[in-house]
Amino acid sequence: MKKCIECGCKEELLVPIYQRGTSCGTEEDYSSKYICEECLDDSLAFGVCTYCGDEGAYSIKDLKDDCCEEHVAELPIIHEDAEDDESGWSSLADHYRDPNHW
Ligand SMILES: [Zn+2]
Ligand SMILES: [Zn+2]
């Protein structure tokens, strides 16, 4: 019988927990444990990958920025881009050059 490992409830909507070390889970990576969505929301031990969705819960240690290891690579990278930096700097420079601010 499936039940939540946290609260022991036997909800229909139990989320299967992936085995530790799973990088992008499939059904084959399910451990025999389940967690209900409610506990999952509050859980400090388990979480879901933003990209994989609610198919399964990862150990929090296998997640980075709410993504599984495989999907971390697909995160929009916040570039400390030379371009952005420059425009940031030049607008700052403009700001200081603007006589209205003096
Ligand atoms: Zn629960
Ligand atoms: Zn993922």
Image (cartoon, helix red, strand yellow):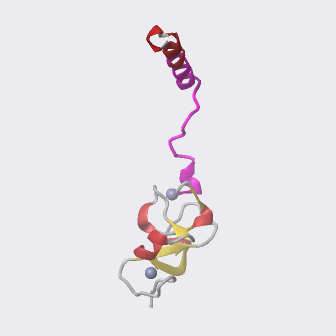
The quadrant of the rendering that contains the N terminus is bottom left
For this rendering, which residue is in front, 24 or 100? 100
Q: Quadrant of residue 10?
A: bottom left
Q: Which residues are magenta?
A: 67-91
Is 15 positioned to the left or the right of 31 in the image? Answer: left
Could you tell me which residue is drawn at 61 percent across and 63 percent down? 62
Q: Quadrant of residue 55?
A: bottom left
Residue 22 location, x and y as percent?
Answer: 60, 65
Q: Residue furthest left?
A: 12
Residue 49 location, x and y as percent?
Answer: 49, 60
Could you tell me which residue is drawn at 52 percent across and 57 percent down? 66
Is 56 situated above or below 95? Answer: below
For this rendering, which residue is in front, 99 or 6? 99
Residue 6 location, x and y as percent?
Answer: 51, 82
Q: Residue furthest front?
A: 102
For this rendering, which residue is in front, 88 or 70? 88
Could you tell me which residue is drawn at 53 percent across and 56 percent down? 67
Is 79 situated above or below 84? Answer: below
Could you tell me which residue is drawn at 62 percent across and 64 percent down? 61
Report the label total: 0
Is 76 situated above or below 2? Answer: above
Is 20 situated above or below 4? Answer: above
Does the segment drawn in magenta span residue 5?
Answer: no
